[in-house]
Image (spheres, rainbow, N blue to C red):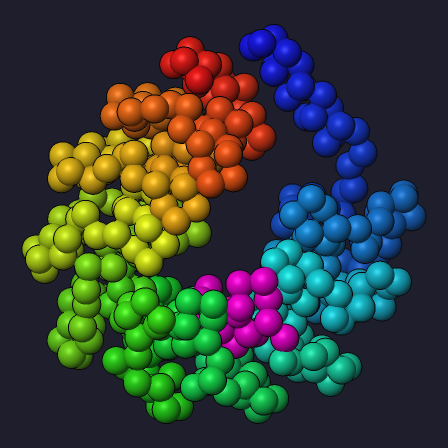
Amino acid sequence: MKKLLTILFAIIALNASAQKNTLLEPNFWKASPDVAAVKAEIEKGNNPAELNVNSFDPTVYAINNSASNETVKYLLTLPGNSLDKLTHDGRTYLFWAAYKGNTELMEYMIAKGAKTNLLDNHGYTILNFAAATGQQNTRVYDICLAHGADLKKELNHDGANALLLGATGDKDFVLINYFTSKGLSINSIDAAGNTAFNYAAKAGDINYLNALIKKGVKYNDNAMLLAAQGTRTGANSIEIYKYLETLKLNPNVIGKNGENVLHAIARRPKQLEIIQYFLSKGVDVNKADNDGNTPFMLAAASNHDIETLALLAGSVKNINQVNKKGVSALAMAVRSNSPEVVSFLIGKGA
């Protein structure tokens, strides 16, 4: 069984690497290639409009790696790169320009007819996506508002407005001050009752959280869950959870989707101390969320850290438990994790 699984992973890896498109390699764009360099790669047969498995294409990589606007504009002239082409998470190029704070490129795209009223797959408008990613250039939001954005009506799938979304990556209250000046309340909440404090807890900046409290912003147990999510750039340290406990917040809080803090923490590697901390607080590693997924299942699906899986496995009651779709931890690991994780689970009786 182990040998067959190893062969399967090898075949998948071989197929994935069989045909490489240089224009889809981030390292190519990190070198800030000019138009001539891009043209040279196209002449070699590299496709300037190809989407990779995650639906990123060369134009997105160019924007996100701060290639010159001339290079991006050239890519936009090529077949297959229309301004309203959908890329990763259903985003057009205007989303990525806003994300990077590239207001010159935003204005260029809008002048060329780019749609400004779109939602991505997570329910983000262009303005809300920029806010959610912590973009500090408020000119981005000025442009969005000038082209029809409505701060009070535009909410993501969780019912969060731009102020809440921006609280996670805000610096020196640039975004909160901006959005309150435009009419949003500092006491905004989303559909689950999360406040700006809760959203800021994702970033784990205790000084910022204390400053929010001084401004009168409320907080609740859900702050634990959002802190557990962390940010794209990394997980939170144990200090943030201890801080939240000093505010009398419950480490055993259950979210609206039936999740506890371990559902998020277990997905990340090198979280042994934090997992042990929450296990000592009675947080249940066997708790299934509304989809039937336990923290251990989610770890098996995406966490390559065997030590983390071993720690969680010590508290797992049924390693072959399945979710509501009938999928087990082993099946998840086979689908999206490493041969080593698959072997570990088999060794544990999966």
Residue 322 sits above or below residue 28 on the image: above
User: Which quadrant holds the N terminus?
Assistant: top right
Q: Tell me if residue 337 can be seen.
A: no
- Does the magenta-highlighted stretch encompass residue 174? no
Q: Where is residue 256? Give x, y as percent.
A: 33, 58
- Residue at 25 percent across and 25 percent down: it is 315
- Judging depth in this view, the residue of 324 and 215 nearest the camera is 324
- Judging depth in this view, the residue of 170 and 160 nearest the camera is 160
- Judging depth in this view, the residue of 141 and 255 nearest the camera is 255
- Residue at 47 percent across and 71 percent down: it is 156
Dividing the picture into quadrants, the one containing residue 103 is bottom right
Q: Where is residue 215? Give x, y as percent.
A: 17, 79
* Residue 313 relative to residue 206: left or right: right
Residues shaded magenta? 118-133
- Residue at 61 percent across and 89 percent down: it is 147
Residue 226 sits above or below residue 95 on the image: above
User: Which quadrant holds the C terminus?
Assistant: top left
Q: Where is residue 7? Give x, y as percent.
A: 66, 14
